[in-house]
Structure formats: C-alpha cells, structure tokens
Image: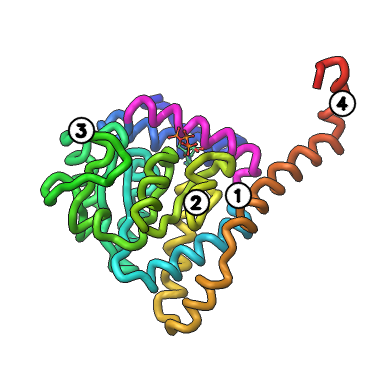
C-alpha cells in the first residue's frame, strides 16, 4: 500500500517487497491486472519451493548463459511483470552479454510497449526493440500477441523470457528457436515446453544470472559447449518436483499431514 513501509523484521519481508514492486509496476502502467494474478500463481509455487534458489535452478541459469554466449543472435524478451520486478538486472545482463532486449506483451498495446521501453532505457538499456521497429508476426500466435520485431525476436536463434504463458514458448520453439524460460511452476506448459527451464523467482534468478554471466563471459568456447551439452532439462524439472515433494514430506514429518485419506475420498 502507498505510504506503508514494510518492517524488515516481517517474516515475509522479501516476498512483500517483491509484491510492492509489481504493484508499483501496475501503477506505472507496465503491469496489467492479469499480471498481478499471474504473480500470485508464482508466489504460491515459490512458497512450496521454499523461497530460495535451488541447485537445479543454478544449473539452468548457467546453461542459459552458456547458450547465450554460444548463440549467433540471442535476445531477452521482456513483459510488464519481468520489467517491473527485475528491470535493473535485465539491463545489466543485456550489457554484460551485449545482447538486445525486446518488449513483447501478451496484452499488447503500443502505449504499454512505450512505457516499458522508456523504463528500461532510463535504467540504462542500450538496445531495446519496442515501438519503433519493423514488425512481423510469429506464426501460431493470433494477432496482436504474435507481433515481434523483424530484427529482434523474429530473427533471434535464442530467446530468454520469463513469467509467460505456454503458447508463446510453444510458438517460438515451433519456428525453430531455442528457448530458456524463468517460471516458478514446473507443471506449467511453459516450463514443460522450454529447452531450458529456470524454476526460480525471476528477481532472484536474474540476480544470479548477472553474477554467472560475469564468471562465464571470458570462458573459452569449448568450456561453454561442455556446459551446454551436459545440460539436461528433464533432470532440472525433476529436481523441482522433488523439492516440492520434500517440502510436503517435511510437513508430514512435522505431523501436519494426518491420514484422513479414506474419509476425504482420496
Ligand atoms: P502456462 O500457459 O505455461 O501453463 P500459465 O497459464 O500459468 O502458464 P500465466 O498465468 O501467464 O501462465 O503465468 C505466468 C507464469 O509465471 C506462471 O507459471 C507463474 O507461476 C510464473 N510466475 C509468476 N510470477 C513469477 C515470478 N516472479 N518469477 C518466476 N515465475 C513467476
């Protein structure tokens, strides 16, 4: 709420700060009301995952950076939620890896594209595809959701995106692009469809991505290939499901799950 300061001692301080960031993005016109709901879905999975960056997420962040460095034309696709939550980290990543950003929206309006583009530029972004690019359409995504920039996503070979619905990932894969996604829900179509799934909260994941990009940036090509070739997305998704199961087993051990299964018809 405006004017209210979240006390640092609050047990859910970080989660509440992130919530404030998304609400602020909504007030600025970057985030749509549906984006607030999508954030809530993410929060629920973050709670189940223990609100931390797991090793399996670090593996996928590392693979993403390796793939970006090996790709011919990588790009970061940014929507309102991602810009509001981690605009600063996205701009840093784009700078370190020397890759462009494209503002690409599910609920697309030219006005919102411009607001997000300006926001990123004010944070220091050098190359942002948005309102003033030559546009075309990604097949399989009905208008205006499928609009992309010809020199941006359309001609990219690797796309990093986050907090998206499954259709976009599916459409990008169908036209031959490699796709890395940041998505807290390992069940989602996006998570299941991507080449690389970073199951982590976007703000945390992108902070780690910046650090890892600095480490890997000067690695020789063979080492990068080794990281990319050894990556297994099924292993990562399985790790995410197991982390959720472990949390539930922990709840059972603490006596929070009592066997009422028959009574409840389970
Ligand atoms: P799909 O179509 O892939 O099944 P969906 O219909 O759940 O996904 P949306 O409602 O658009 O897609 O939600 C976006 C996705 O982003 C959800 O899977 C949600 O868990 C995830 N998400 C939301 N906030 C965050 C966040 N801060 N960090 C990472 N993931 C997030």
> Residue at (81%, 16%) from the top-left corner?
264
Q: Colour scheme in the image?
A: rainbow
Left or right of residue 201: residue 56:
right
**Per the image, is 41 magenta?**
yes
> Residue at (38%, 48%) from the top-left corner?
86
Q: Determine the CA span between mark 3 and mark 4.
A: 50 Å
Q: Are marks 2 and 1 in contact (CB under 8 Å)?
A: yes
State which tag comes first along the sequence, 2 or 4.
2
Left or right of residue 8: residue 139:
left
Residue wearing tag 4: 258
Q: Quadrant of residue 158?
A: bottom left
Residue wearing tag 3: 109
Q: Determine the CA span between mark 3 and mark 1.
A: 34 Å
Of marks 2 and 3, the one in the foreground: 3
Residue wearing tag 2: 204
Where residue 68 sits in the image (x, y, percent)?
39, 67
Classify 216 as above or below 245.
below
């Amino acid at each position: 709420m405006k004017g209210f300061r979240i006390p640092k001692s609050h047990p859910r301080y970080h989660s509440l700060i992130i919530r404030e960031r998304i609400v602020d993005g909504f007030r600025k016109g970057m985030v749509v009301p549906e984006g607030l709901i999508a954030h809530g879905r993410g929060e629920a999975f973050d709670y189940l995952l223990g609100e931390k960056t797991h090793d399996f997420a670090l593996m996928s962040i590392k693979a993403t950076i390796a793939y970006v460095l090996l790709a011919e034309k990588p790009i970061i696709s940014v929507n309102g939620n991602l810009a509001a939550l981690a605009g600063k980290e996205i701009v840093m990543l784009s700078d370190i890896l020397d890759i462009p950003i494209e503002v690409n929206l599910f609920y697309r309006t030219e006005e919102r594209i411009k607001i997000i583009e300006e926001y990123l530029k004010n944070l220091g972004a050098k190359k942002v595809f948005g309102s003033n690019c030559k546009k075309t359409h990604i097949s399989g995504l009905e208008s205006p959701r499928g609009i992309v920039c010809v020199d941006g996503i359309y001609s990219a070979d690797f796309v990093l995106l986050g907090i998206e619905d499954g259709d976009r990932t599916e459409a990008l894969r169908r036209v031959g692009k490699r796709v890395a996604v940041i998505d807290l829900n390992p069940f989602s179509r996006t998570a299941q469809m991507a080449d690389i799934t970073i199951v982590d909260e976007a703000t945390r994941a992108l902070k780690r991505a910046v650090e890892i990009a600095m480490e890997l940036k000067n690695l020789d090509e063979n080492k990068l290939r080794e990281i990319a070739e050894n990556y297994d997305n099924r292993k990562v998704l399985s790790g995410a499901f197991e982390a959720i199961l472990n949390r539930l087993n922990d709840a059972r051990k603490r006596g929070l799950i009592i066997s009422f299964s028959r009574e409840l018809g389970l």
